[in-house]
Amino acid sequence: MVGSKMTVKHLSKRARTTILIRDEYTCQKCRFEDKYARDLEVHHIKPSIYGGSNGDNNLITLCVLCHKYAPNDPLKFGKYKESECDGQLATLLELIEKFKNEKKDLWEKAVKEHQLK
């Protein structure tokens, strides 16, 4: 945003470690385990730039891939977290569903041409 300052509340190393331990060094989306936490990140369910806190109840462990595709909306995040696939696939499926609903005629044409279901 031009002309405005967004404040990001940085997470301390101690807070990050606390969440990683709580979540047993496991991505809470795809269940990827990484005992050295090289490919794990701590995600704000409600982003700090939107007023989310660094409290334990607003933080969750995600692998790099799941974190990359995690939505910033807390309500969408709940649905995203509960889907049975990794972050990239969950996002792709959501986009396909959106396309099917918003461009029904194009979707039906593609299904017919490529014999999709």
Image: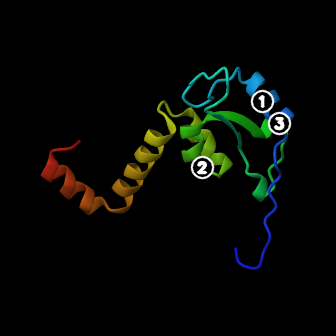
Q: Secondary structure at mark 2?
A: loop
At label 3, counting other C-alpha atoms closer than 10 Å, the crowd grade (few under 14, some 14-19, many 20 or more) is few
Label 1 or label 2, whichever comes before in sequence order = 1
Q: Report x, y in % for residue 6.
A: 78, 65
Task: Say which residue label 2 marks.
Answer: 71
- Foreground label between 2 and 3: 3
How many angstroms separate mark 1 from mark 3 (CA)?
Answer: 10 Å
At horizontal 71% and vertical 24% (from top left) the residue drawn is: 23
Any mark on residue 19, and which? 1
How many angstroms separate mark 2 from mark 3 (CA)?
Answer: 24 Å
At label 1, counting other C-alpha atoms closer than 10 Å, the crowd grade (few under 14, some 14-19, many 20 or more) is many
- Foreground label between 1 and 2: 1
The amino acid sitting under disc 1 is: Ile
The amino acid sitting under disc 3 is: Lys
Up-down: is 102 above or below 89? Answer: below
Q: Secondary structure at mark 1?
A: helix
